[in-house]
Amino acid sequence: MPVKPPVTWLKYFDEFVNKKIDPADLTLEGIDSIINVHRHSFNVLHHSVPMIYLLDYTTGKYAFVSRECSTHLDFSYTKMMEGGVSFVLDNYHPADMELFNNSIFPDRLKILESIPASQHKDHIFSFNYRAKNGKGQYVNLLQRNSFIKSDENGRPLLSLGVVTNVNHFKIENPVIQLVEKIDPINGCIDTISKNTYYFRQEDKIFTKREMEVLRHLTDGLTSKQIADKLFISEHTVINHKRNLHHKSNTQNTAALISFAFRTRLL
């Protein structure tokens, strides 16, 4: 049976072009209060407040973009409101857009498919990317969003999110997507998944030293014991382990070793 190709971000928008959506399906309670509170943020915090947006997937337009857009991206919020997704595409870094469109967004849909539509709004999707600002410079951004409205089939309709300029804190590669679930009762946040994406396939390949560390991990050695065997510092071993987890998208040593055997690295 042929494998169905993943639904990319751009294809997802295209699927809604010829569909008629009942306006009632996009009705949200409480969204006006969120926007109004944001508009009256204290002036002293103005430059620390992230940009807020509300994206309508059924039209490819932004129903709302806050004025902080100029703070983080150096262009007016009206440009995003008027241009919609097309404007974003013109300013997205091409490599970052390809990665988001073909890998990150399809992974999001898979996660959403495993969650009841009523719980979509309780999950936060975070990732970093590069986009061109009003000065024509690429800046590093951190986006956190929740799909606050989905249809009965679990397809997201509205996305409410925040964007923050992290140009002074974030390196460009790799891209990390974090998915968290918020308990609506007590507000506690649990990590659902954390995946690392690379622009180049070769960046996912374990280095010779990382393979050495991996082999010693399969023998049950601690970071200190591995450091003594390889004549390197324990801190260096910990960094190698962190890279191994990022490249394999694993959270612990057991999962890493399982990945290594499953992919025949060992």
Image (cartoon, rainbow, N blue to C red):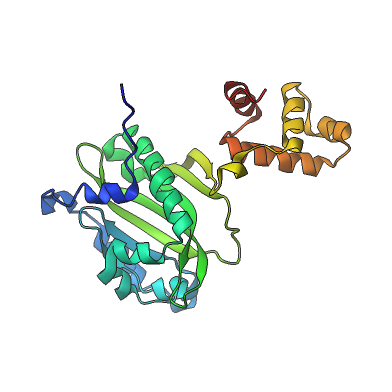
- Residue 203: percent from left, percent from top: 61, 44
In-image side of 61 versus 94 (left or right): left
Q: Nearer the viewer, residue 33 or 14?
A: 14
The relative height of residue 216 versus residue 166 in the rendered view (above or below) is above
Q: Nearer the viewer, residue 178 or 37?
A: 178
In-image side of 256 versus 94 (left or right): right
Q: Nearer the viewer, residue 220 or 96?
A: 96
In-image side of 38 versus 237 (left or right): left
Q: Quadrant of residue 235?
A: top right
Q: Where is the N terminus found, in terms of image quarters?
A: top left
- Residue 199: percent from left, percent from top: 53, 49
In-image side of 218 versus 182 (left or right): right
The relative height of residue 254 versus residue 142 in the rendered view (above or below) is above
The relative height of residue 184 versus residue 138 in the rendered view (above or below) is above
Q: Quadrant of residue 50?
A: bottom left
Q: Residue at x 66, y 29 (%)?
A: 253
- Residue 57: percent from left, percent from top: 25, 53
Q: Residue at x 23, y 50 (%)?
A: 14
User: Can residue 183 be seen in the rendering of this structure?
Assistant: no
Number of labelled discs? 0
User: Can residue 258 be seen in the rendering of this structure?
Assistant: yes
- Residue 76: percent from left, percent from top: 36, 77
